[in-house]
Amino acid sequence: MLDYVGQAHRNYNFYEKFATVSKKKGKALKKEIESGFVTLPKGCHLHMEKQAKEYILRNINSFINNKTTIINKIKTFKLESEKELNLSNFIEFYNISIKDIYKTKNTFYRLCVDANIKDYVENIDEKVLSTAMVRLISTDSVRLLRFWINILKLYKDNKKLEVLTEVEERMLLMLHYTLYNKAPKDMGLNSIDEFLSRLYKNRLIYEEILEVLEYNLSHVKLSHKKDNLNYDSALEVHATYNKEQILSALCTNTLDKQYPLREGVLYVEDRKTNIFLTTLNKVEKHFSPSTMYEDYAISDELFNWQSQSRTTIESNTGQRYINHRDTENKILLFVRENNKEDGITNPYVCLGQANIVNYSGGKPINIIWKLKEKLPAKIASQAEKAL
């Protein structure tokens, strides 16, 4: 029972309290309060009378970090902190998340320019790279971060790159598709070296990308594991990836184009790999009836999943799923809790390989998979919310 009868001090931070309860931030937290906390875990309920809700929403508005409040903080940072203004120092001093900065769809450099702290220097791809930073900040694969940092530093120092292996080229293509929304060939880029050259022309943003990658590397929270596929996918189990990174890692010929992925499934035939991208909390606003499947973790090893609504057991696709072990087809699961958070598309956590335990029904087929790697506690708690 939470009592809001007494008048709280105007600087009391309800934002942090409700963000902790609901695991939502920014506009997503406001929507959660307005809707009555519809995504709380099973058995939990939180109800507020109208007057208390309005008061708390007004309070929360004052604590949400938006473009204006961040620019104001940049203006006063040196005076208040007596530290050098850089991304890490700024985040630490004001105790904000890196996502708070990049959800503004601006680079930190551009925010500093708008605050009259730095001079403007033209970056040829500033518009597209500014919106791409929210995708970059979700990267937490230690292998990927270390490799990207190493390559970008070598290129910046004008040192000759070693001949890249096939998997290393794919890892750099993962970076390309994180930052750019077009295939390299569609941008007139015919090689990885041409991609790096194009990126380096955005000199100040290039430096900021390196700073973001180093920040992420120093803040990795979960230990990741090898996927143990019969080929090197460049992916790590329990690391976080966006859709573009997943497709770049697992599909071939992504220099020319990326594979289409509809309804969260894709079969990569030359690798005999089935890719399943699953969103646990499905809200009708974002999902059609044909994609409202029942997907959730039964335990830290078992995962309930439904196929597309048109798939029958007798179909080639259905047979490939239920007989995947006999035909040596791999099943790779990726999950995310919500489609979007605070207006930003969420990435997926790689759960790794899975084997079929049993199945039932048809149109859709209901399948229980056993994961080769157990879910960490943090991911398991999110995946079980859908129960």
Image (spheres, helix red, strand yellow):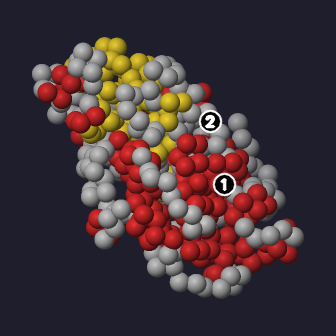
Tag 1 or tag 2, which sits nearer the N-term? Answer: 1
Q: For mark 2, give the secondary structure.
A: loop
Residue 377 image point, x, y percent: 60, 27
Q: Nearer the viewer, residue 67 or 8?
A: 67
**What's the residue at 50%, 36% (across, down)?**
236
Type of amino acid at the residue the image marks with label 1: Tyr
Residue that numbered label 2 is attached to? 222
Quadrant including the C terminus = top left
**What's the residue at 61%, 67% (across, down)?**
157
Q: How many marks?
A: 2
- Is residue 69 among what the camera can see? yes
Whether residue 54 is situated above or below residue 43 in the rendered picture: below
How many residues crowd around disc 2 within 10 Å: few (fewer than 14), some, or many (20 or more)? few
Q: Going by the image, does 278 lie left or right of 39? A: left
- Is residue 366 among what the camera can see? no
Q: Going by the image, does 322 lie left or right of 240? A: left
Residue 197 image point, x, y percent: 46, 70
Type of amino acid at the residue the image marks with label 2: Leu
Q: For mark 1, give the secondary structure.
A: helix
How many residues crowd around disc 1 within 10 Å: few (fewer than 14), some, or many (20 or more)? some
Residue that numbered label 1 is attached to? 215
Q: Going by the image, does 232 lie left or right of 288? A: right
Q: Nearer the viewer, residue 152 or 304?
A: 152
Residue 14 image point, x, y percent: 71, 53
**What's the residue at 70%, 36% (across, down)?**
1
Q: Which mark is residue 169?
A: none
Q: CA distance from mark 2 to mark 1?
A: 15 Å
Residue 81 image point, x, y percent: 85, 68
Q: Nearer the viewer, residue 279 or 5?
A: 279
**What's the residue at 53%, 62% (across, down)?**
160
Q: Nearer the viewer, residue 48 or 143?
A: 143
Whether residue 285 is situated above or below residue 377 in the rendered picture: below
